[in-house]
């Protein structure tokens, strides 16, 4: 597979345009999972709350969130365990969070329609301070608070499950005394699901509403377009998704979710994490999680004081958005199809092409070097379909458009999807090389 993709990528850089090859896509009418409105979300570092990145007056950012949402904003990251709670501080300082900062976040949630998973420091905190912050967050965010998350990727600094269970219980118990009925997500391990089953079994009756994990492909020293495009069918992502599905379904937790993810950790790599190939990668990743009945992915982004976040869906200059990039386009194409039932699909006639359906809509993700013409069988009959093409001149290009439109830093998006005929359940669409197509039927 990897060799095939590599060969195709080499061919792409030199290839003259040749005739599209014919492929067949059959979307399975049966479905085991529902894709909700909040499937494609974001994850940000906690220090952005004190820095006031999230405020309802940040008009461009509000619009960029609204275009993708309403969805779920998870606040956490490495910085959650370096940010302290100051109940008496004036606010507006990145290193601490105050009640006034939480108020700004709550107004941002209202303005965008997004809900919040609120991370609380575990590594350098006390249960009492955690509970104090949780009480203010619960009161201020109200119904927009989905869950508390305690610490970030605790398997990085806590060695064993029993040690973590004791620590989590101490913090969660303290929070429960101040916030009766508090909801939690966890265990949110980095690139592992080894505690998921224990966590689900022991916490299922203790307010856990999201069984969570974080999955990146690998460290950014490994960043590579060919490997990135192959990572959804081999490696960590499929293995961890399968384990999460198992732990979730065996224990009756309301949902399992990848609460933080992106392609390569340590901020990703320029030229890999933020180019067209990353948009196509993010689509396959979302499809893989939905196929395993996952409730969604929070793609990590924004800015960090640790390293530049090349993979960020939105690009920033300080606190202000200056544009969107690859993963945002992947999330936007995904969002244009839903919500609805997830359908697997079979593809014949091409190697590096994947496909799936949401509702009576179909995705064809062509990672190959050649254009294809796909004859698609939808789950149900329709008459017409709008066709959204997510494309760029090359797989390593940043010049991405969706249905002929870029997304502006102010959220301006003027898609011009083409209309095609659907005969019964069948339609035909052209999918350029290195592009994804969404067919929205009517
Ligand atoms: C994750 C951390 C996040 C980092 C990211 C990265 O939670 O804070 O920004 O890795 O290394 O593990 O890119």
Image: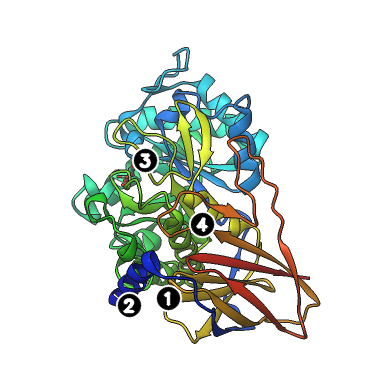
**Mark 3 or 1, which is nearer the eye?**
1
Position above or below: 310 against 202:
above
The answer to whether residue 69 shows anywhere in this view is: no
Which part of the image, by quadrant, shows the N terminus? Answer: bottom left
* Label 1 element class: loop
In primary-sequence order, the first of circles 3 and 1 is 3
Marks 1/2 in contact by CB < 8 Å: the verdict is yes
In primary-sequence order, the first of circles 3 and 4 is 3
The residue beneath circle 1 is 352
In primary-sequence order, the first of circles 3 and 2 is 2
At 51% from the left and 58% from the top, the residue drawn is 296
In primary-sequence order, the first of circles 1 and 4 is 1
> Measured from the top left, where is residue 268 in percent x and y?
32, 47
Q: Return the mark for residue 309.
A: 3
The residue beneath circle 2 is 4
Distance from the alpha carbon under mark 1 to that under mark 2: 8 Å
The crowd level at tag 2 (other Cα within 10 Å; few <14, some 14-19, many 20+) is few
């Amino acid at each position: 597979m990897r060799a095939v993709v590599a060969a195709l990528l080499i061919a792409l850089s030199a290839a003259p345009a040749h005739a599209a090859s014919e492929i067949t896509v059959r979307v399975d009418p049966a479905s085991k999972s529902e894709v909700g409105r909040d499937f494609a979300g974001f994850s940000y570092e906690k220090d952005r709350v004190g820095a006031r990145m999230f405020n309802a007056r940040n008009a461009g950012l509000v619009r960029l969130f609204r275009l993708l949402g309403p969805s779920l904003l998870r606040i956490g990251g490495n910085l959650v365990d370096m940010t302290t709670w100051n109940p008496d501080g004036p606010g507006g300082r990145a290193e601490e969070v105050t009640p006034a900062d939480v108020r700004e976040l709550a107004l941002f949630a209202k303005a965008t329609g997004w809900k919040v998973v609120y991370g609380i420091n575990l590594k350098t905190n006390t249960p009492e301070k955690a509970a104090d912050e949780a009480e203010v967050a619960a009161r201020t965010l109200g119904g927009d608070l989905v869950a508390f998350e305690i610490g970030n990727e605790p398997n990085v600094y806590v060695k064993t499950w029993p040690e973590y269970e004791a620590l989590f219980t101490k913090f969660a118990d303290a929070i429960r005394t101040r916030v009766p009925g508090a909801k939690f997500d966890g265990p949110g391990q980095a690139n592992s699901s080894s505690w998921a089953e224990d966590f689900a079994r022991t916490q299922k009756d203790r307010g856990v509403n999201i069984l969570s994990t974080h999955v990146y492909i690998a460290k950014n020293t490994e960043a590579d377009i060919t490997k990135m495009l192959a990572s959804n069918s081999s490696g960590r992502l499929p293995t961890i998704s399968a384990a999460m599905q198992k732990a979730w379904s065996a224990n009756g937790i309301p949902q399992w979710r990848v609460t933080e993810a992106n392609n390569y950790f340590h901020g990703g790599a320029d030229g890999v994490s933020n180019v067209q190939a990353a948009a196509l990668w993010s689509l396959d990743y979302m499809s893989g999680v939905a196929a395993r009945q996952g409730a969604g992915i929070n793609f990590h982004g924004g800015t960090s004081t640790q390293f530049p976040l090349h993979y960020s869906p939105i690009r920033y200059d300080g606190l202000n958005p200056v544009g969107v990039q690859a993963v945002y386009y992947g999330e936007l194409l995904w969002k244009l199809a839903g919500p609805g039932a997830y359908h697997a699909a079979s593809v014949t006639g091409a190697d590096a092409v994947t496909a799936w359906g949401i509702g009576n809509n179909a995705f064809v993700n062509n990672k190959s070097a050649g254009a294809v013409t796909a004859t698609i069988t939808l789950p149900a009959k329709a008459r017409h379909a709008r066709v959204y093409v997510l494309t760029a001149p090359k797989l390593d290009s940043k010049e991405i458009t969706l249905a002929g439109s870029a997304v502006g830093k102010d959220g301006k998006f003027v898609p011009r999807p083409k209309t095609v005929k659907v005969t019964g359940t069948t339609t035909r669409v052209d999918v350029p090389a290195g592009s994804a197509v969404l067919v929205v039927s009517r």
